[in-house]
Image (cartoon, grey):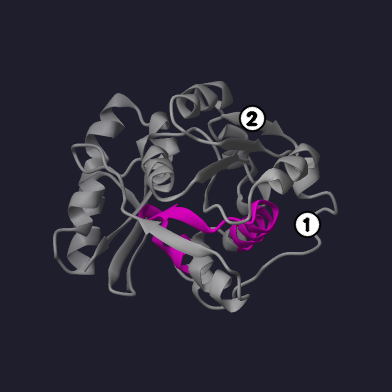
Amino acid sequence: MKIVHGLSKWSDFRLSINENQRIGFIPTMGALHKGHISLIEKSIDENEITIVSIFINPTQFNDKNDLKTYPQKVENDINMLSSLNVTYLLLPSEDEMYKNGYNYKITEKNLSFKMEGLEREGHFDGVLTVVMKLFNIVNPTCAYFGEKDYQQLRLIENMAESFFMRIKIIPCKTIRSEDGLALSSRNSFLTVDERLIAPKFHDALKSKKSIREIKKQLNNDGFKIEYIEEYDGRLFGAVKIGNVRLIDNEKI
């Protein structure tokens, strides 16, 4: 695996890649877990070259404290990726990614204002903008995204289609712990007691009960509910347990 620090060095590597080779891309913010690994392994199986990026994108955080406390485990991530057949690890800096500040951004005017968009103002502007930048930098054949962040996945699919981008977006199933909790970098912040309660969130979403009944059940279990909503044939939810925010969705 070649580790590329900075976009100027990356330009030279990118020019050396044969355009006839299939390139799979997995953009991440680091703190990698088995969910990320499943995307990477799928890309390795399906492509000749697999590129992973790690960049904690500041423009998608509406809470500065959330950005400040977001887990950073770059050395662990590098060790994890080194054990796989990843071709390149791209590590751009904030100064490079936003060398002109945040003067230009991608805004979607419908789905991005629902659910996560209501709870996290400007979040999807930041997500779509950084993904567009990374797509232009990497120029992959296809890119892999998990269904845990299903709203994000749909927005990225729609963006790629709307801007006639020649990139295939590959949805990948949510990876869960044995007790059903969706894997997330933020799960490491759960206390022992909170970790025991957390799987009840997904249990409630898949219970086939009404939204009203699900909210009552989650309240009784000690969750603070941000939203439970149906959209696109799925039931979406966001809750807090202690200081940790969990999101998930389940096909109806």
Question: Which amino acid, mark 2?
Answer: Ile
Give, as a single range, the part of the protein colored magenta.
Answer: 125-154
Count of marks, rendered view:
2
Picture disc at residue 128: none
Q: CA distance from mark 2 to mark 1?
A: 27 Å
CB within 8 Å, label 2 to label 1: no
* Residue 130 within the magenta-colored segment of the rendering: yes
Q: Residue at x 56, y 70 (%)?
A: 160
Residue 168, x across and y down, in percent = 49, 64
> Up-down: is 134 above or below 194?
below
| N-terminal label among 2 and 1 | 2
Picture disc at residue 102: 1
Which of the pair 235/215 is nearer the observer? 235
Q: Main secondary structure of the magenta part?
A: helix
Q: In the picture, which quadrant includes the N terminus? A: top right
Q: Local crowd at mark 2 within 10 Å, few (<14), some, or many (≥20)?
A: some
Residue matched to label 2: 3
> Up-down: is 247 above or below 12?
below
Q: Secondary structure at mark 2?
A: strand
Residue 16 location, quadrant: top right
Which of the pair 236/213 is nearer the observer? 236
Residue 57, x across and y down, in percent = 64, 46
Is 107 positioned to the left or the right of 205 in the image? right
